Amino acid sequence: MANSIESPHGEVRFRHALDWLLAQPPAAPLLVLAPTLDAGNDLLRAATKEKGAVFGWAMESLGSLAMRLSALPLATRGLTLAPPLALEAVCVRVVSDQQTQGKLGRLAPIGDRPGLPRALLRTFSELAQATIDPEAVPAELGELYRHYRATLANLGLADRSDVLLAAVEVARTSAASPLGVPLCAFDPAPKTRLERDLLELLVQR
């Protein structure tokens, strides 16, 4: 049964989450989903201070839970999560390839600027996490985006959108812990379409 509250005051939201936790059995599994691990730890410390020892309670941020849920599916597909510097290096390669082939179009005058790959990476990340199909992105930006996605696949690399997509699929189909247990979603603050999809599935489960 859902029990939710909205308030502009953080202390009100914190107290509501704490009261919910205090009403839960101390030895039954549940999941606390917080905006950061530090925020989740603060909430759990407050709960155990009033309630005493608990067993089977898990705590994650939306990002850390996505990493946990996606680890096996990504490994099964032979994909490795790429750090930001590696993703930027992929963008440098993509820009260089497109520049060599004369496909930068309106971006050609800034093709040699060091800030272009970094700006493209931010754009590609936003597009992917908004689940925008590469074929729907027009002109030279679409060409660059499609080349970027293809290069990631060829190198066996995954970005955050791949992590979230895999996590969403696991959340939709798996019954493994920590899915399907009572959930305290304390200010999870999803920022992208995929994060919102993941949170919605967790609440439904």
Image (cartoon, rainbow, N blue to C red):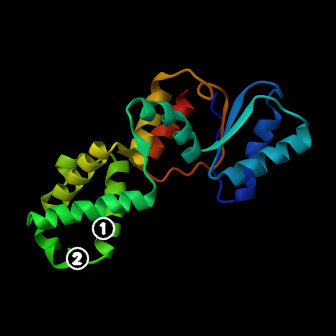
For residue 112, the mark is 2
Q: From what the image shows, is residue 190 above or below residue 48?
A: below
14 and 87: which is toward the camera: 87
Left-right relation of 197 to 55: left
Q: What secondary structure is found at the residue carrying circle 1?
A: helix
Choose top left, top right, bottom left or bottom right for residue 165.
Answer: top left
Left-right relation of 185 to 195: right
Residue 137: image location, x then y, percent? 19, 54
Is residue 15 shown to the viewer in this render? no
Residue occupying the point 75% across, 45% down = 16
Choose top left, top right, bottom left or bottom right for residue 51.
Answer: top right
Residue occupying the point 46% across, 27% down = 172
Q: Quadrant of the C terminus?
A: top right
> Identity of the amino acid at label 1?
Pro
* Cα distance between the residues tagged 1 and 2: 9 Å
Label 1 sits on residue = 117
Residue that sits furthest to the left in the current view:
102
171 and 19: which is toward the camera: 171
Residue 42: image location, x then y, percent? 77, 51
For residue 26, the mark is none
Q: What secondary structure is found at the residue carrying circle 2?
A: loop
Q: From what the image shows, is residue 33 above or below residue 202?
A: below
Sequence order check, earlier mark of 1 and 2? 2
Q: From what the image shows, is residue 52 above or below residue 125?
A: above
> Identity of the amino acid at label 2?
Asp
